[in-house]
Amino acid sequence: MGPLSVSRRATLTRRVTVSAAHRYRRPEWDDARNAATFGVCGHPNWHGHTYEIDVTIGGAIDPLTGFAADLTALDAALKREVFDVLDHRNLVLDVPEFHEGKLIPSSENLAWWVADKVQAALGSQTRVLRVRVSEMRGLWAEVEPG
């Protein structure tokens, strides 16, 4: 049987797990406003999560290989750009984009950060379609850059 003439598409999702600390705080706000806005997430002595980060890539299935995306490239990008940067780190102190006064390290912002980093590492051959960041059971943020 020859290659299919109909373009079939598929997605692949890989999960990476990282543990990291953070807090939410706007330096231009006083302590009362930060506490009222961010609650326990603004605790001055930080708090942490074991994040599950799902990155979905995909495209047309190559009729010769059967692959919709390069999983090896995704794995390398996730290790270098996500795991090695975030695992056992303080997001505010160790990741420049989340330094105090910059992006709040919310799951929403973290999902966009992951999407941007992984897409840049993969180049134009593979599209990041979705990133899901779960900070605890029953709570996650999803972005769809692709």
Image (tube, rainbow, N blue to C red):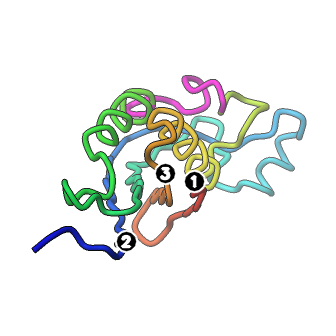
| Location of residue 24 by image quarter | top right
Mark 1 belongs to which amino acid? Ser
Cα separation, mark 2 vs mark 1, equals 35 Å
For marks 2 and 1, the one nearer the N-term is: 2
In the rendering, which numbered label is found on residue 83?
A: none
Q: Secondary structure at mark 2?
A: loop
Measured as percent of width and height from the top left, residue 20 is found at 44, 38
Task: Please give left or right for residue 66 compared with residue 103 in the image.
Answer: left
Please tell me whether residue 34 belongs to the stretch shown in magenta: no
Measured as percent of width and height from the top left, residue 79 is found at 33, 33
- Residue position for label 1: 107
In the rendering, which numbered label is found on residue 7?
A: 2
- Please state which of the two labelled residues, at mark 2 or mark 3, is closer to the viewer: 2
**Span of residues in magenta:** 86-97
Cα separation, mark 2 vs mark 3, equals 17 Å
- Residue position for label 3: 127
